[in-house]
Image (tube, rainbow, N blue to C red):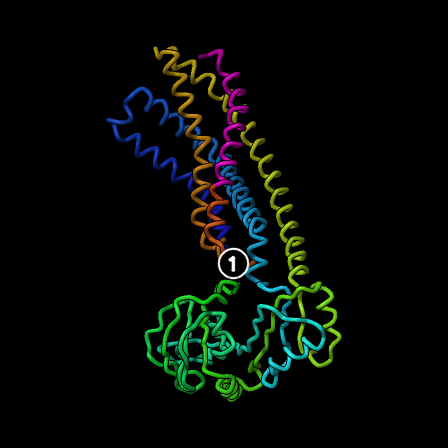
Amino acid sequence: MAVVLVIIGTYLLFTSISVTFLKLMKKNKNYYYKTNHFISVSGMMYRMKQNAVGLANICILSTMVLVMLSTTLSMWSSIDRVVDSQYPRSVMGNGYGDASNIDFDEMNEELIRMGIVPKNLLAYKRLDYAGYLKNGTLITDYRNEGMNAVNEVQEFYCFPLKDIQDYENIKGSLKPNEIYVYSNAETIKKKTLSLFGKEYVVKKQLDHLKMDESNPNVTEHYYIIVNSEKTLEKMQQDQIHVYGDNASAIRAYYSFDCDANEREVIKKLGQNENINDFIWLSKLDQKQGLIELYAGILFIGIFLSFLFIMATILIMYYKQITEGYEDKDRFEIMQKVGLEQQDVKKAIHSQVLTVFFMPLLVAGLHVCFAYPMIEKLLHLLFVSDSWLYIRTTIFCFVAFALVYIVIYVLTSKIYYGIVKRNV
């Protein structure tokens, strides 16, 4: 819907708004009744009325090129960063059963018996659930007065402190009724949070959490850190009491680095019946899959951009030919009324330059306003480096502007060739 409205707005801009703006300039007598301004404004009014649709087409095609190239190049350039953020360790295990009874110490011993020495180990349990936090109270029914629609649902991720304390470098300890909170949405103003009917004291709101850097979820979400697994299990029971069969289970996540071959380690782990409640992934395999995905998207982006550039060239070429023949008589009349050839050439250059570069400037404006939406889409594809996208977009705009200039110079020669015998 947003894209359709932008396209409609672009046509209205070139067909109506631009002409209205030029009419206002015409009413300014001190500005309009000067040689260069008179010729330029009147010429642009004529061009806008006759060729507004063509200019709008050029603008839309240019916007498509800029958006596709900037997004696909950003994705391709960030592969290593995405892999490191999503898969910070060589081997990762995601538990798909209820992790309440899993003992990580026993898992460590089992890996050692298998000849696998886990390094840089990160193992934690997590409880995920959804709701809506209003005035410090978790609302669990979207039909409740506190929520306007189901799309306002927020995500909650709950961890025991001891599992992530070293990884997140969190100082201090918690009592059973105390929690640490991190939110990507807002500052927690309440001193207590009511979660499934239980009151928890917010001991501190964290201003940064490394785990959130690799979270592709762009919706509002909260990280709740409790004092122990026992408290996490009690929270799960409270959730079951509210959500019933729709309640989520506690999951286990186990990742580590090792000196052995990752694929061989994955194979061994998959054959071990003592730890078969995990889906094991290797960083190398995930990177290869990501390269294949992003390479395909990059190819499509470059291919479609090439097609749109070709369409832009054809439109500009056609415009220069038709406008050259249409302007022959006008420039001849200008000379007959006493204008010098130098003034006429200057007016032609200013007029054509302004008209043909207006679509490029409006396309750049479109990309700027599309940034928030594109940033969210990239975040869903694990590209969270906003500054990388901004740099890539600037580079693509400059490169496309150079290509645009070359196209303009080549096609404008045809225009000047048609009218030069009159100037």
- In this rendered view, identify the residue nearer to me: 397 or 330: 397
- Residue 317 drawn above or below residue 109: above
The residue lying at 49 percent from left, 77 percent from top is: 158
* Helix, strand or loop for the magenta stretch, by majority: helix
Q: Position of residue 71 (x, y in %)?
A: 54, 49
Q: Which residues are magenta?
A: 395-423
- Which quarter of the picture shows residue 80? bottom right
On screen, 97 above or below 77? below
Q: Secondary structure at mark 1?
A: helix
Q: Which residue is mark 1?
A: 379
Say whether residue 398 is magenta.
yes
Residue 177, quarter of picture: bottom left
Residue 151 % position (x, y):
48, 69
Residue 152 visible from this viewpoint: no
The amino acid on which the numbered mark 1 sits, given as a three-letter code, is His
Q: Residue at x 38, y 35 (%)?
A: 19
Label 1 environment density (alpha carbons within 10 Å; few <14, some 14–19, many ≥20): some
Q: In the image, is 22 to the left or to the right of 130?
A: left
- Going 37% across and 68% down the picture, which residue do you hit? 186
**Residue at the image point whose x is 60% and y is 34% from the top:** 310
Residue 302, position as x, y percentages in the image: 61, 42
